């Protein structure tokens, strides 16, 4: 029996790196310290809905073929495409992302990550106002006030509160939960809100107004605030602003409740502006609650290699970036792509109906370990190994800290990185290039 320690969980953006996994005869027999989501991901590698073999759609049915045949067919689609959409890449390694960007550049494709439908607006907010950040370690060791705004870690990041933010005992926060106040701002009383010292129920779409009102209190202009803002009485706004101003070190964790609601990226920009004000009195930072375990890594790699974090269009040979025009859902809604390569993402389940309709009408290649809604639309399906379980790789935590994920068991599936490397070679061969 093998006992593997310090295993990194490949599920959510918390990237818990303290798991212990036992392996016997290449089967995972025990997983310690993972939450139910991480446990199911790691244990489920051998259990759920794996894509067993490469497949190509023939006469409307997906039929099993060899890896070579599937890669040849996929490369033909890419080589003959005028503008391919390469989308997903949030649940795979940075090494695979790097290859995917190379493939997109060589085929004149548009590449985007799942941030398109989650924290994409955060990127725009950072462009506009910056992002006073910290590591989760600093939050654990120093934060005496944590605000969860538009996010629900009890369900989406189950160990976040015990490892980093709420109950964690740090150097200056030895009493754990007793050492810090917790505030939640959300449109409904979530299970996270039920654990908070202060819960503020904002009206849907009212986040921007509330942030502006809090800034007025911080800047001692509370006279301008009406009796109620975004459904919240003025007294409550003053109470929350005072908590922020009096904290020694506060962190605002913000989720899709802010990035995908009314005002979109302006909400993130307003959080950043609030921190600018707060940092004149105390220390305050912001961290996005990223969902897919390596969606942060996609942004990092894309930034190094192209200068842009997502929604990158190579159709004019140079990298061009203009979210709203070059986002994955933008081009699909305009019918502006003639093929798609979907990897480690499931737009079939998460995109708007019109965008899914466009995907159904164009040749679609899927690279994924598991069957999902996108498999039903795919013309070529290439199964991949699970990164962090069957192959190793690098991922970035939600606070942009890189961690090395381990290989726990052997597999016969190719990794995403190997599949994309094969695709690059085959496309070059078809195009008669290098
Ligand atoms: Fe895995 Fe996230 Fe659970 Fe940690 S909180 S064990 S990273 S799913």
Image: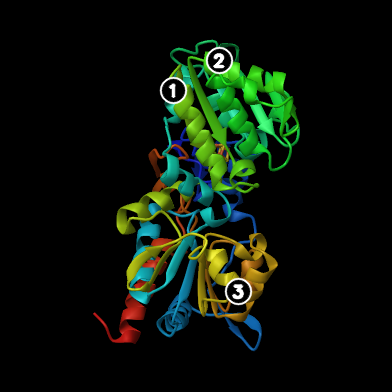
**Mark 2 or mark 3: whose residue is earlier in sequence:** 2
Residue under numbered circle 2: 176
| Label 3 Cα crowd, 10 Å radius (few <14 / some 14-19 / many 20+) | many
Alpha-carbon span between mark 3 and mark 1: 46 Å
Query: In percent of the image, x 57 and y 68: which residue is there?
Result: 52
Residue 96 percent location from the top left of the image = 39, 59
Would you say residue 151 is visible in this rendering? no
Query: In percent of the image, x 57 and y 36: which residue is there?
Result: 254
* Among the 4 quarters of the image, the one containing residue 105: bottom left
Label 2 with label 3: CB-CB less than 8 Å: no
Residue 259 percent location from the top left of the image = 58, 45
Residue under numbered circle 3: 359
**Mark 3 or mark 1: whose residue is earlier in sequence:** 1
On screen, residue 269 versus residue 181, left or right, reads: left
* 434, above or below 421, in the image: below
Which residue of the protein is positioned furthest toward the front in this rendering?
224
**Label 3: which secondary element:** helix
Query: In percent of the image, x 69 and y 68: which residue is there?
Result: 353
* 48, above or below 198, in the image: below
């Amino acid at each position: 029996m093998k006992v593997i320690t310090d295993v990194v969980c490949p599920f959510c953006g918390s990237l818990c790196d303290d798991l212990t996994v036992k392996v016997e005869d290449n089967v995972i027999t025990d997983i310690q310290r993972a939450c139910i989501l991480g446990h199911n991901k790691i244990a489920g590698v051998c259990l759920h809905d794996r894509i067993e073999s490469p497949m190509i759609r023939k006469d409307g049915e997906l039929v099993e073929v060899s890896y070579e045949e599937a890669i040849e067919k996929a490369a033909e689609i890419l080589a003959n495409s005028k503008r391919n959409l390469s989308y997903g890449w949030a649940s795979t390694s940075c090494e695979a992302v790097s290859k995917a960007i190379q493939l997109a550049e060589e085929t004149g494709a548009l590449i985007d990550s799942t941030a398109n439908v989650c924290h994409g607006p955060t990127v725009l907010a950072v462009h506009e106002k910056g992002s006073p950040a910290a590591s989760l370690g600093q939050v654990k060791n120093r934060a005496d006030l944590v605000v969860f705004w538009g996010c629900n870690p009890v369900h989406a990041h189950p160990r976040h509160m015990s490892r980093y933010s709420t109950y964690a005992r740090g150097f200056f926060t030895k009493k754990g939960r007793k050492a810090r106040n917790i505030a939640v701002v959300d449109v409904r009383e979530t299970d996270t809100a039920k654990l908070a010292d202060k819960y503020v129920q904002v009206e849907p779409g009212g986040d921007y107004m509330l942030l502006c009102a809090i800034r007025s209190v911080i800047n001692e202009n509370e006279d301008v605030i009406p009796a109620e803002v975004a459904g919240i009485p003025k007294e409550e706004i003053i109470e929350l602003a005072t908590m922020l101003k009096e904290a020694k070190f506060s962190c605002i964790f913000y989720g899709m409740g802010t990035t995908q609601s009314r005002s979109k990226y302006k909400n993130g920009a307003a959080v950043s502006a609030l921190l600018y004000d707060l940092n004149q009195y105390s220390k305050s930072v912001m961290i996005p609650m990223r969902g897919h375990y390596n969606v942060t890594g996609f942004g990092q790699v894309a930034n190094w290699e192209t200068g842009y974090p997502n929604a990158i269009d190579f159709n004019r040979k140079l990298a061009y970036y203009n979210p709203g025009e070059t986002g994955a859902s933008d081009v699909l809604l305009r019918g502006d792509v003639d093929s798609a390569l979907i990897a480690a993402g499931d737009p079939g389940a998460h995109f708007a109906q019109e965008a899914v309709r466009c995907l159904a009408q164009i040749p679609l290649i899927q690279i994924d370990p598991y069957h999902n809604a996108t498999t039903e639309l795919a013309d070529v399906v290439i199964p991949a190994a699970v990164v962090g379980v069957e192959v190793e790789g690098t991922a970035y935590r939600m606070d942009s800290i890189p961690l090395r994920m381990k290989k726990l068991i052997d597999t016969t599936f190719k990794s995403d990185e190997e599949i994309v490397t094969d695709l690059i070679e085959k496309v070059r061969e078809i195009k008669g290039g290098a």
